Amino acid sequence: MGVEEEESPAEVAVPGRESSPEATGADPGLLADLAARASQDLPMIALPGGQFLMGSDDPLAYPEDGEGPVRRVEVAPFALAPTTVTVAQFAAFVVNTGHVTDAESFGDSLVFTGLLSPDLQESAPAVAATPWWRQVSGAAWYAPEGPGSDVRERADHPVTHVSRRDAEAFAAWAGVRLPSEAEWEYAARGKHEQQPYPWGAEREPHGQPWMNTFQGEFPDAPSAPVGTMPADAFRPFGFGLYNMTGNVWEWTTDAFSSGDHRAVLRGGSYMCHDSYCRRYRTSARTGSTPDTSLGHTGFRLAVDI
């Protein structure tokens, strides 16, 4: 289960960071501090492409999610970022463009209740079908748990509370794009055909977590800290990619099905737990409208080669 050799790395130059006259709700000092920590380049890893078996008929799969049937799919060569876009990188984008996210425009976003202050746990409205989600006014990428929180100590974590529209705006600014669903799964499998995890068949080799998912009893009794980890946490697998499963869901360019135009997200998140959501696997998928923002959703970049 050792780390596979990486393909040839590449870099994409990030546009300059001149200030924009447009406004965002983030504190200018916080933005400047975060943006200063962002690299001027976006590293990319070249993937050779080719045919692979996409989807799963495994007992762990969710048939209602359209994971199956298993089918042979071909992807052209492309390059993928080794990590999701970080808070610092997104701050550089906002400083340069003045971009206002959908969460900021709508005035709220969804946050896991276990991350909230006692006051917000009492006052923020719960989502009826999934009461561990709270609709928090003021929650945004720079204040992920709402007013009083910030990301100053999370510059290297995945940016969250970004919609697919926000992710597409970042990609356009950087001169790249989001991956397709097939590209994402091809990359996540990392040469391990029809295996549920980027490293193979076993979820926790040697009894140790190899990805960031919910530990303990979901949702009220975690046995480990809950929330994002740095974008390069854990070891890279397959093509040299970090956290293709766990940590945060990742936007792709595809629709959920021919009759369901929600955008596809892949990879699972720090909230996934086998008691209710086994979607921390290479074939797992979910869908959401392109303007939705959530506290466990980010994105990773791709480019044609």
Image: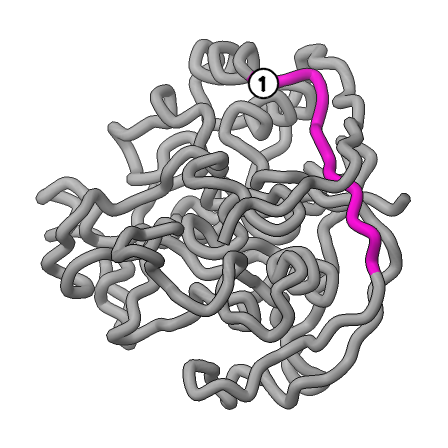
Q: Is residue 295 visible?
A: yes
Q: Is residue 293 visible?
A: no
Task: State the residue in front, 52 or 277.
Answer: 52
Identify the residue shown where x is 49% and y is 54%.
1
Q: Position of residue 82 (x, y in %)?
A: 63, 39
Q: Answer with the quarter of the image where residue 265 lies.
A: bottom right
Q: Quadrant of the C terminus?
A: top right
The answer to whether 270 is drawn above or below residue 201 in the figure is: above
Identify the residue shown where x is 28% and y is 60%.
133
Q: Is residue 150 left or right of residue 95?
A: left
Q: Is residue 213 left or right of residue 286?
A: left
Q: Does 21 lie within the magenta span?
A: no
Count numbered badges in the picture.
1
Q: Position of residue 215 (x, y in %)?
A: 22, 56
Q: Does 43 lie within the magenta span?
A: yes
The answer to whether 133 is drawn above or below residue 123 in the figure is: below
Q: Amino acid at mark 1?
A: Ala
| Element type where label 1 sits in the image | loop
The answer to whether 31 is drawn above or below residue 124 in the figure is: above
How many residues crowd around disc 1 within 10 Å: few (fewer than 14), some, or many (20 or more)? many
Identify the residue shown where x is 67% and y is 81%.
257
Identify the residue shown where x is 58% and y is 56%.
291
Residue on which the image places disc 1: 38
The answer to whether 47 is drawn above or below residue 97 in the figure is: below
Q: Position of residue 240 (x, y in %)?
A: 62, 42
Q: Which residues are magenta?
A: 38-49
Q: Position of residue 222 (x, y in %)?
A: 15, 54
